[in-house]
């Protein structure tokens, strides 16, 4: 079928070996007339080999905006560097023609089982599924680990906010919605996501998400309200103890993992709300 041309943009930060692996995965994506692929190296010291080097500000929003500026296609598709897109990704997005006032298409994200407790936990919880964020009622948003954006709408609202290290996807969705644009699901346009492999990395990620949640709640009151940490701590203890007891009784290893990781990640998120969400870092007084 005919479809519009697409600029595929991938923000990247990591080692030269990781960059080469990203390049190899993107080579499998089938391109049509007018399509482009842009890898943006957002590392502090770019390695070379990327299409765009953007070391000035280490944020996903800054990297994605620099990549978007490189092309001119009517649609943009953003995928994260830790995903593996299928060959048909761009075609899958337009298997159904988007409505005229649709600005965002929410592609599917499937967490891979991987190795280690953190990856297994993310797979069980389907942490990167669009369902996790599209069920937030008036504060629903599309995760930009895999999404398509109409360039006209993207440019009209000024693209991603560049000065924050997380939450830029929700912020963009809220601004697009305020401007009268809509969202559609495209679960068939699905990528595989490689989750954090260590518990330490996962906890750090959840803390960063907490910082983003607090920032979003200040700018969009009521979007991500805080929970009381003392009460949450007691909940975490009770959840872990009761969950481990039930898992041991029923001999269910998966339930034991959830019993430990659910409280840990929830606490990390809430404690992370006190962290700054700006780049360069600006601590609240």
Image: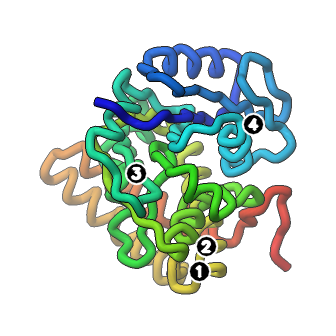
Is residue 272 left or right of 262 when viewed as pictured? right
211 with respect to 128 (left or right): right
Q: Secondary structure at mark 2?
A: helix
Give the quarter of the image for residue 141. bottom left
Q: Secondary structure at mark 1?
A: loop
Q: Residues within 10 Å of mark 4 (few under 14, many from 20)?
A: many
Disc assigned to residue 216: 2
The x and y percentages for residue 127 are: 39, 50
User: What label sits on residue 42 in the rendered view?
Assistant: 4
- Closest to the observer: 267 or 9? 9
- What mark, if any, has residue 220 been given in the picture? 1
Judge whether 282 appears above or below 145 on screen: below
Q: Residue at x 73, y 48 (%)?
A: 62
| SS at circle 3 | strand
Label drawn at residue 105:
3
Cα–Cα gap, marks 3 and 1: 22 Å
Determine the CA span between mark 4 and mark 3: 25 Å
Taking the spot 51% from the left edge, 21% from the top edge, the residue there is 26
> x%, y% of residue 88?
34, 25
């Amino acid at each position: 079928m005919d479809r519009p041309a697409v600029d595929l943009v991938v923000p990247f930060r990591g080692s030269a070996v990781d960059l080469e692996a990203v390049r190899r995965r993107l080579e499998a994506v089938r391109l049509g007339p007018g399509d482009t692929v842009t890898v943006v190296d957002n590392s502090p010291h770019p390695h070379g080999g990327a299409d765009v080097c953007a070391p000035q500000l280490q944020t996903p929003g800054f990297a994605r905006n620099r990549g978007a500026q490189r092309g001119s296609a009517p649609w943009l598709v953003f995928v994260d560097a830790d995903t593996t897109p299928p060959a048909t990704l761009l075609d899958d997005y337009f298997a159904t023609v988007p409505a005229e006032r649709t600005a965002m298409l929410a592609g599917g994200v499937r967490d891979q089982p991987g190795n280690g407790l953190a990856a297994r936990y993310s797979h069980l919880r389907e942490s990167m599924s669009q369902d996790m964020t599209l069920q937030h009622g008036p504060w629903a948003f599309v995760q930009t680990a895999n999404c398509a954006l109409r360039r006209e709408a993207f440019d009209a609202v000024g693209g991603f906010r560049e000065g924050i290290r997380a939450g830029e996807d929700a912020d963009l969705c809220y601004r697009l919605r305020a401007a009268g644009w809509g969202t559609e699901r495209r679960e068939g346009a699905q990528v595989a996501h490689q989750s954090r492999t260590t518990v330490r990395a996962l906890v750090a990620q959840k803390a960063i998400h907490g910082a983003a949640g607090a920032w979003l709640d200040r700018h969009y009151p009521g979007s991500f309200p805080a929970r009381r940490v003392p009460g949450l701590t007691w909940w975490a203890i009770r959840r872990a103890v009761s969950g481990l007891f039930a898992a041991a009784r029923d001999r269910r290893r998966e339930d034991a993992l959830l019993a430990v990781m659910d409280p840990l990640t929830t606490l990390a998120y809430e404690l992370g709300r006190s962290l700054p969400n700006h780049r360069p870092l600006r601590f609240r007084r």
